[in-house]
Amino acid sequence: MLQVPNQDEYQEYYEPYVKVIPEGDLIQILKSQLSEMKILIDNLTEEQALFRYAPEKWSIKEVLGHVTDTERIMSYRLLRIGRGDTTDLAGFDDQLYVRNANFNQQSLSNLLQYFEATRHSTIAVMSTLSNEAWLRRGTANQTEVSARALAYIIAGHERHHRQVIHDKYLAALR
């Protein structure tokens, strides 16, 4: 069973993501999140999925795309660090990614498939890691991070944004 990472295994910025995920079977948590995200947004219309609760905020489609792109990058970092790669890994600009992704022109069904494929890939990578691999550390975005911290960040990031969709987007659509 994967233990919650220590605070020295990740940048303070990620604390809100890490602390919302309980210790336990992280693979099962990730599988549950996949179902929960699909239930949350699967019945939205294309028009509803374009909703922004404020002018400067992303649409629901953009939030889902952001969650997926971020997970793909974090999972790649987890793979490299878990395999012992000590190469400094670059950061990324999430605003730039969303701006250039054209998520609003894609169908919600396609974005859900992208999320599902990415999540299954993340779970597959995690399933190959040894106990030793989870504790390995590397550098991403000029900050030291462990493989297990990345796993918790992935789960916490999805949970955070799913809660935002529920509380701010869907509540406003009712």
Image (cartoon, rainbow, N blue to C red):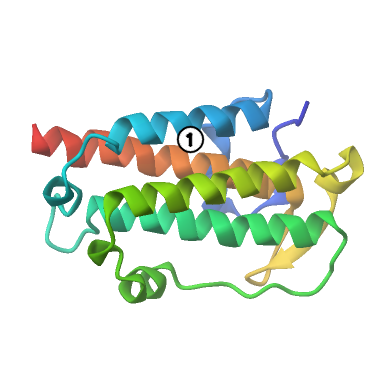
Residue 90 appears at what percent x and percent y?
63, 75
Identify the amino acid type marked 1.
Answer: Leu
Q: Can see residue 92?
A: yes
Local crowd at mark 1 within 10 Å, few (<14), some, or many (≥20)?
A: some
Q: Residue at x 26, y 34 (%)?
A: 166
Residue 16 appears in view: no
Where residue 55 appears, x then y in whole percent?
A: 12, 61
Nearer to us in this view, 132 or 51: 51
Which corner quadrant of the image does residue 96 belong to? bottom left
Q: Residue at x 58, y 72 (%)?
A: 91
Q: What residue is disc 1 on? A: 34
Q: Quadrant of the C terminus?
A: top left
The residue sitting at 60% across, 43% down in the picture is 120
SS under mark 1? helix
User: Relative to the observer, which residue lies in front, 164 or 118?
Assistant: 118
Residue 6 horizontal/vertical position (percent)? 72, 40
Above or below residue 169? Residue 21 is above
The vertical placement of 34 against 146, above or below, is above
Vertical comparison of 86 with 58: above or below:
below
